[in-house]
Image (cartoon, rainbow, N blue to C red):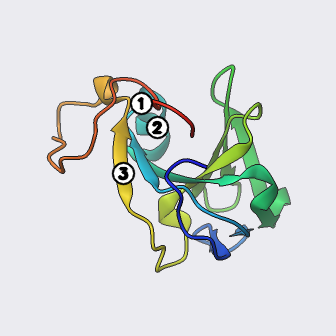
Amino acid sequence: MNDDGQDRAKGGGCLCGAVRYTVDGPLRQVVSCHCSQCLRTHGHYAAYSAAIRGDLSIDGADNITWHQSSDAARRGFCGVCGSRLFWDNVAADYVAVAAGTLDRPTGLTTVRHIFVDDKPDYYELTDGLPHLPRGHDSGR
């Protein structure tokens, strides 16, 4: 896994508690995505960690609504409260987890920004992290 995060089990969930998840394995460090889909889905850019698909367990999975947002990926949100939880490229070995839905402390750090060519004009990126014009440079 690239950008290894914590190796202990981490939990998280939606605002109303109808969906809870556990990651029993490492979490990727956080990547901020500025693509037009994340902007429209989250109302701003989105911060995501990621977990190996087999390490993710979901309680309340029947409360997740999946939206096929592109040919390659779908987005999962709580059908009760609307919390955006997952970005899932079903062909990949990982599932991206919305970093804000993780229980604190996360022990994670934001490591880069992706799709900065799609970034709107109302904010600047001044944190000194790598800026990729499109998606990831490698890995997940």
Q: Quadrant of the C terminus?
A: top right
Residue 35, above or below 31? above
Q: Quadrant of residue 21?
A: bottom right
C-alpha span from label 2 to label 3? 18 Å
Element type at mark 1: loop
| Relative image position of residue 97 (x, y in whole percent) | 59, 54
Judge by depth and name the residue closer to the eye, 16 or 24.
24
| Relative image position of residue 134 (x, y in whole percent) | 40, 24
Q: Residue under label 3, please give it.
A: 111
59 horizontally vs 113: left or right: right
Residue found 70% across the figure and 36% down from its top: 67
The numbered disc on residue 35 is 1
Mark 3 residue type: Val
Callouts 1 and 2 close, C-beta under 8 Å: yes
Name the residue furthest top: 71
Mark 2 residue type: Cys
Is residue 13 in view? Answer: yes
Residue found 54% across the figure and 47% down from its top: 2
C-alpha span from label 1 to label 2? 5 Å
The numbered disc on residue 38 is 2
Name the residue furthest right: 62
Mark 1 residue type: Cys
Callouts 1 and 3 close, C-beta under 8 Å: no
